[in-house]
Amino acid sequence: MQANRAQPPLPGFVELPEPEVDWHPCWLPSDAAAGTLERLLSEVVWKQDKIGTPGGIKPLPRLTAWQGDPGTVYVYSGIRNEPQPWTSTVLDLKRSIEATTGATFNSVLLNRYRSGVDSMGWHADREPELGPTPVIASLSLGVARRFDLRHNATGVVRSFELTNGSLLVMRGATQAQWRHRVPKAPGLIGERINLTFRSVSPRSSEVREEGTSSS
């Protein structure tokens, strides 16, 4: 018996690019995710940085925090982030996500979206200290938000609904070939916290992106 062979594509067929992502829509049960959100709201030291824009200096449209091992300084858009010590909740999440992904992380950027007004513009995490093919694990807690990935060469967009307790892992050439964002959601009420775990070299470097870092 002959092996099955793939049929040739139809005339005019174009294979669309796909990002290299692992998608776990229910990584944390909803009750565990809700409890984790409440703990992070109280135990994390949140700040609102300012950023230079064509319209002048403006506050970032979200709150942030940076935690990590000593020396994991992170600089983006002129904002220098000295690592805060790991809080117990974040450290437990890091260890569990490392077990799921098979990757090792030494730092995390936390973004707190207070409502649908808070957002994240198009950007890619292409900092030299991340390496050419970084693994970035993005955990979402709270109200669901849309996450868009746009291919640099084709403009193809792939979207995910980042629900409470979902885990999206970006791998390989995703950062080199795609940009991502969390667009505004007018009228949406409710908090969302996103944790993007990564591994950076223990040094600071400037980010040459117009946006900021991860979802």
Image (cartoon, rainbow, N blue to C red):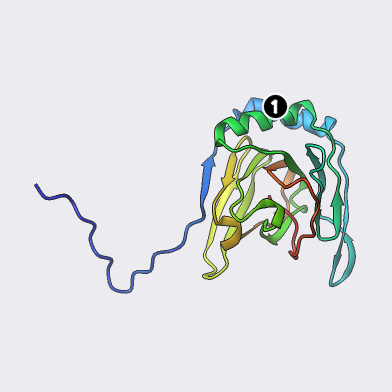
Task: Indicate the position of residue 159 as horizontal and vertical percent values.
Answer: 55, 54
Mark 1 residue crowding within 10 angstroms, few (<14) / some (14–19) / many (20+): few
Per the image, the residue denoted by label 1 is 92
User: Closer to the camera, 15 or 59?
Assistant: 15
Q: Is residue 26 visible?
A: no
- Looking at the image, residue 106 sits to the left or right of residue 59; the answer is left
- Looking at the image, residue 58 sits to the left or right of residue 160; the answer is right
Residue 50, placed above or below residue 162: below
Task: Indicate the position of residue 25 as horizontal and vertical percent values.
Answer: 54, 38
Give me the residue at 84% from left, 30% from top.
Answer: 43
Residue 151, placed above or below residue 49: below
Residue 150, placed above or below residue 133: below
User: Closer to the camera, 93 or 161?
Assistant: 93
Give me the residue at 9% from left, 47% from top.
Answer: 1
- Number of numbered discs overlaid on the protein picture: 1
User: Closer to the camera, 40 or 188?
Assistant: 40
Q: Is residue 41 visible?
A: yes
SS label for mark 1: helix
User: Closer to the camera, 126 or 201?
Assistant: 201
Give me the residue at 66% from left, 57% from top.
Answer: 181
Task: Indicate the position of residue 3 as horizontal and vertical percent values.
Answer: 16, 49
Residue 13, placed above or below residue 167: below
Give me the residue at 77% from left, 53% from top.
Answer: 117
Task: Indicate the position of residue 116 as horizontal and vertical percent values.
Answer: 74, 50
- Circle 1: residue type: Asp
- Looking at the image, residue 25 sits to the left or right of residue 58; the answer is left
The image quarter in which residue 46 lies: top right
Given the current orientation, which residue lies at the most extreme left position?
A: 1
